[in-house]
Image: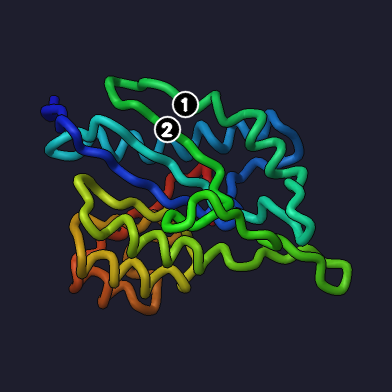
Amino acid sequence: MSPKGHGICACALVDYDNVRLQQKEYSPVDAAAKLLAIRRVLLQHCMSLSVIPDELHIRLYGGWLNERGHYTQRAEWVLSQINTVRGRVNGVRVVPDVVIAIAECGSKPLFGLVRTIRSLRAQKMVDTMIAVDAIHFADGRSGPLLIVSDDDDIVPPALAARARWEPVVLFRRRGPGQGLNDGTCESQGVSLLALPEEFQR
């Protein structure tokens, strides 16, 4: 078994709405199943490292707040179930968080993370929040930076974060070699890992 890394913290930035299970999300029970699946993937990776982190912070990004600053139904489901993934697992302390502000301005929530446009609800600012936080957490890191998103908008911040810190791992539904810029990612040291079959392809 790999040694524990005293003081080492893995930080995972998860685009919750972008990564979906095969099973649709219709209730808090479904949200709990998805949270547990995300934690399982991230913990399995942490346990495979040469030095296992003491802590795993899971930052969940999504369309949590509408234009009026009210939580959406999906946000309420996740908030009601978030404690199912909190706590110590295999010696690693898991700390989940529903993110409504960038790390630099943690006390200042951003409204309109989801907006209604022509009667359709659309996620806004989430990719940019992940990008900004990827750079923030890459500076002065003491452990791996893990990004969970299948959106190509995350590739530039993953590369920028890797220029500041290693390791940076990008988890996607697609396997390595299936993205337009996978060669660049791999040449620059961004590790690409496919999510397991329980997630949609």
| 7 to the left or right of 100 | left
Label 2 secondary element: strand
Q: Which mark is residue 174?
A: none
Left or right: residue 37 compared with residue 22: left
Q: Which mark is residue 95?
A: 2
Dividing the picture into quadrants, the one containing residue 51 is: top left
Taking depth in this image into account, of 162 and 113 the one nearest to the observer is 113
Identify the residue at the far right of this view. Answer: 119
Q: Residue at x 36, y 75 (%)?
A: 156
Q: How busy is the neighbourhood of tag 2: few (under 14 within 10 Å), some, or many (20 plus)?
A: some
Q: Position of residue 118 (x, y in %)?
A: 87, 74
Horizontal placement of 142 versus 157: left or right?
Answer: left
Q: Quadrant of the N terminus?
A: top left
Please, what is the three-letter code of the amino acid marked with disc 2?
Answer: Val
Residue at 75 percent across and 34 percent down: it is 27
Q: Are marks 2 and 1 in contact (CB under 8 Å)?
A: yes
The one of 2 and 23 positioned closer to us in this rendering: 2
Q: Earlier in the sequence, mark 2 or mark 1?
A: 1
